[in-house]
Amino acid sequence: MPWRLLSAVAVLVSLSTTAWQIPVAAQRTPVAITVWFPLPTGGPLKEAMDDLVARFNSAQTDVKANLELTGDYGQNYQKLQTAIVAGTPPDAAMMELMQIPEFAQAGVLAPLDEWAKQPDFNFPDIAPALLGNSYWKGRLYALPWQRSTTMMYYNIDAFKEAGLPEFSPPATWDDVQRLGPKLTVRQGSQITRYAVEGNFNQDWLFEGLVYSYGGKVISDDGRRAVFNEAPAVRALTMLRDLAKKDRTLNVNPNFSQIIENFIAGRTAMIVHSSFALSLITTNARFRWSVAPIPAGPAGPVHNAGGGNFVLFAKTTPERQRAAWEFLKWMTSPANTAFYSMRSGYLPVRVSAVENPQLKEYYRAYPMAKKSLEISLRYGRGRMVVQNVEKGVRQFLNPALEAALLGSADPQQALDDAAAKATAELGK
């Protein structure tokens, strides 16, 4: 008997969307699957995921999905490694997209190419801009889910206060250097409002900046680190000058605090995740908007980030099939629209933007629509490397911190890190 699910209509009445109608399978004990999901213990994201999983389980009788939270992306990565070594991985999981090549190369992920060809899945409807990190060596291993891009947010009232045009955020980093002193507020030696803030000591923001300056982080064959070449050095030097000479940039390692500082008026602009939109919408008490990230010579680049769903190869065919049905249901147009409205993440299907409730949401929150348009226009997939944690991040991120939060020379810091990264990537 083919694998079957009830109509999504039965469980998404609130979305009023049309889904396929499939007869209910004969009653039997449902196949229980375990799905790992990187989230802290609570909050709006957990509530949205709990709601979706409950709806999936009540929509049909063939599969019972059990969601287990695994902490942040780093904790999720460590737990997956441990489970794989022990031979007890989950049936499905969401993992940070940069980690997919490592697990795919190790043979622990199930290829999704044949599953994705099913007519009722409609693979061409998956947003092309979000598929950049779903492949490894020509095979599909992941489906986008909790996806965002980098984004710039700016305080319109702060621009007015500084005597600047209210709706003309800086288009380039040269503009940031020019406008920064006007947007920065000082009381003696203390800065009470920075012009711009972001965690540029991390590879996600820095990688997009390198692309914007016309460079690369890793060679096309994934064997050499090239983040010490001229474009990357120019980008890091520019950030260092903003942070240390002009003192208009606050390089903040605390991802959540950056949003808090913007909401509190302690920074005029932030470069962050498009996910921050929902928190700013709920809590900001001033006029604000979103804009493309200031551009380098190659134009604006918004690095795609977030997590993708994967299936694990070490499971029974029955549970793998059940896990696929869960992924297929979750990534349906109705459900990705629902999750986008509840979480602030991007819808992963093109057709989801035609969802009536999502259209109404965009009318009520125009910044959400503008953010989506910017993401789709300037979004770019991230570097594809077999082991980003061991081959890139453990060297690049400390180098960025040394230059931006310490006293290291940008060229020297990147040279040292690139040599170590290349030695690791070449193994």
Image (cartoon, rainbow, N blue to C red):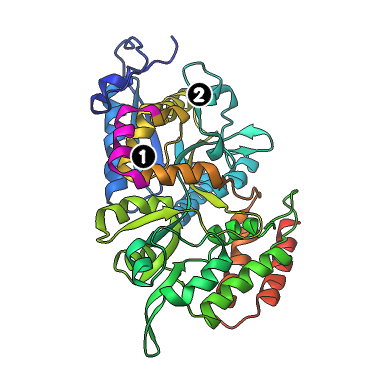
Position of residue 57 relative to residue 28, above or below, is below
Q: Residues within 10 Å of mark 2 (few under 14, many from 20)?
A: few
Residue 240 visible (yes or no): yes
Q: Which element is circle 2 on?
A: helix
Q: Which residue is mark 1?
A: 340
Which residue is found at the position 69% from the left and 57% from the top?
214
**291 magenta-colored:** no
Position of residue 173 relative to residue 318, above or below, is below
Which residue is found at the position 37% from the left and 50% from the top?
39
Single out the residue that lies furthest toward the bottom: 188
Which residue is found at the position 30% from the left and 42% from the top?
342
Residue 307 visible (yes or no): no
Position of residue 105 relative to residue 358, above or below, is below
Magenta region, residue range:
354-367
Q: Position of residue 45 (x, y in %)?
A: 32, 46
Of labels 2 and 1, the one closer to you: 1
Q: Amino acid type of disc 1?
A: Ser
Q: Relative to residue 247, is residue 256 drawn left or right?
A: left
Q: Which residue is mark 2?
A: 317
Q: Nearer the viewer, residue 146 or 16?
A: 16
Q: Relative to residue 328, is residue 107 drawn left or right?
A: right
**362 magenta-colored:** yes
